[in-house]
Amino acid sequence: MGASPTFWLVFNAGVLLILLFDLGVFSKKRADGQAEEVPVRTALIKSGIYVLLALAFFVYLRMTYGATPEERTTKSLEFLTGYIIEWSLSVDNIFVFVLLFAKFGVPAAYQHRVLFWGILGALAMRAVMILVGTSLLREFDWIMIIFGLFLIYSGWKMLKSVSAEGEEEVGGQKILAWMRARLPVTDEYKGNRFTWREGGKFFLTPLALVLIMVELTDLVFALDSIPAIFAVTTDPFIVYTANVFAILGLRAMYFALSGVIHRFKYLKHGLSIVLMFVGAKMLANYFAGGKAVPVEYALMLTGSIIVGSIALSLWKTRNEPPHGPEVGPVTPAAKG
């Protein structure tokens, strides 16, 4: 069973309404018209609401998505497993966003807008990747081998990188230098605008460069997350909706966790194990000609690894005070 075109349309319209409601209702404006900083309490409430929406959608799938009770159970569990994988990988994005905003000295009041447009771009980008990936898997099922090996390699590479000592840095220095050398960019922020006109000339602002880096960061993460969920299901509707619900809460989650994200020191270890597990599961599914690992077992193992890594992180860092990235004017170093 697949989702009807009407259901696809209604679902995407609902997502757009949620984003517009979020931007219009929760984004308070200051007297100068700029968005106010998002309080941690508000961000936590919004993050909780997005999780509840995902769980409500899981219940909906459990009741309606499938011709038989067994199919409905399987499809709903595939969604929940995929959602947990995508959600945990989206938390990993926050590490990079914190470093990126600190590097560029992005004022907290402007971060809200960057993340909003970044999420819209991420949704469109992942929709294209999911459609392409689904089409390739239908035509060439041996691609599962490539995806599986890639995930195992990616997980191992992540595990090695987080095990090494040293301060984490934001990548993309060559990309930043290329953009600075070839694009007209203002030296300072112009409010929360991405473009600026001065003397009849068109300029990008540093905030536009931040948005580009956010989109490129999500593209890199999507190269892991999209193949990972294909190890759980190849149903494009399940793959897409799990991604959407994980990404929808990313902006609120950033403002809720940015001050304590440094305490999630073992999350990357957990994510690397999850990537290697789903890669092995994908290989096993291909060579077994079906579901080698039942979805309920995959859900329990994935959830246990993620919850365990977060719990261990919070316990090990329980005496560390919260802190957030310092922001301020753009420095010469931030210009690439």
Image: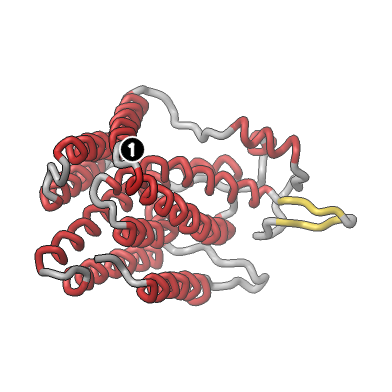
Image-quadrant location for residue 262: top left
Left or right of 48 on screen, residue 99: right
The residue wearing badge 1 is 143
Q: Residue at x 59, y 47 (%)?
A: 212
The x and y percentages for residue 17 are 46, 75
Secondary structure beneath dot 1 equals helix
Other-residue count near label 1 (Cα within 10 Å), few / some / many at <14 / 14–19 / ≥20:
some
Image-quadrant location for residue 77: bottom left
Left or right of 136 on screen, residue 280: left
Q: In the rendered view, how is the structure colored?
A: secondary structure
Q: Is residue 53 above or below residue 116?
A: below
The x and y percentages for residue 331 are 67, 39
Q: Is residue 36 above or below residue 297?
A: below
The x and y percentages for residue 76 are 20, 63
Image-quadrant location for residue 197: bottom right
In front: 222, or 184? 222
In front: 145, or 101? 145
> What is the residue that sits farthest to the front in this orientation?
139
Left or right of 137 on screen, residue 118: right
What type is the residue that disc 1 sits on? Ile
Q: Residue at x 65, y 51 (%)?
A: 208
Q: Is residue 39 above or below residue 204?
A: below
Assign the N terminus to one quadrant of the image: bottom left
The x and y percentages for residue 232 are 23, 49
Q: Residue at x 72, y 51 (%)?
A: 204
On the question of residue 279 being in view, the answer is yes
Q: Residue at x 77, y 51 (%)?
A: 203
